[in-house]
Image (spheres, rainbow, N blue to C red):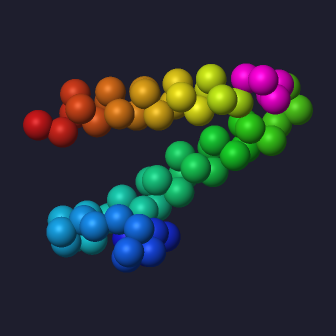
Amino acid sequence: MSNVKENEYNTDGYVELMDIDDYLEAIHYEWEKWRDGPMTEQEDIGRAREDILSYIQSYLKRSLK
């Protein structure tokens, strides 16, 4: 995992074998673009953050079988 320090997250080697950093960075980029956009209200950021994390977690739980 190139963007996460080794001591921050122990992957047991599985994640390093998967090419997922670019996809995670794309999600992060879209999040920042929305968050810093002209239509985003400060009070919406916390709810939106929880919403996107819940959506991604739900998607992955359904998809990774």
In percent of width and height, residue 5 lies at: 44, 74
In percent of width and height, residue 12 lies at: 18, 69
Residues in magenta? 40-44
Q: Residue visible at 22% across and 28% down?
A: 62
Residue 55: say if magenta: no
In percent of width and height, residue 34 lies at: 72, 36
Instruction: Give the quadrant of residue 14.
Output: bottom left
Q: Residue visible at 53% across and 57% down?
A: 25
Give the residue at the far left of this rendering. Answer: 65
Give the residue at the far right of this rendering. Answer: 38
Question: Is 50 positioned to the left or the right of 41 in the image?
Answer: left
- State the count of labels: 0
Q: Residue visible at 73% across and 43% down?
A: 33
Viewer-nearest residue: 45 or 40: 45
In percent of width and height, residue 23 lies at: 44, 54
Question: Is 6 positioned to the left or the right of 25 in the image?
Answer: left
Q: Identify the main secondary structure in magenta.
A: helix
Instruction: Give the quadrant of residue 56.
Output: top left
Instruction: Give the quadrant of residue 47.
Output: top right
Q: Look at the image and tell me in which quarter the N terminus lies.
A: bottom left
Determine whether 8 is above or below 28 in the image: below
Determine whether 64 is above or below 26 in the image: above
Q: Look at the image and tell me in which quarter the C terminus lies.
A: top left
Give the residue at the far front of this rendering. Answer: 7
Viewer-nearest residue: 15 or 47: 47
Determine whether 9 is above or below 58 in the image: below
Q: Residue visible at 63% across and 41% down?
A: 31
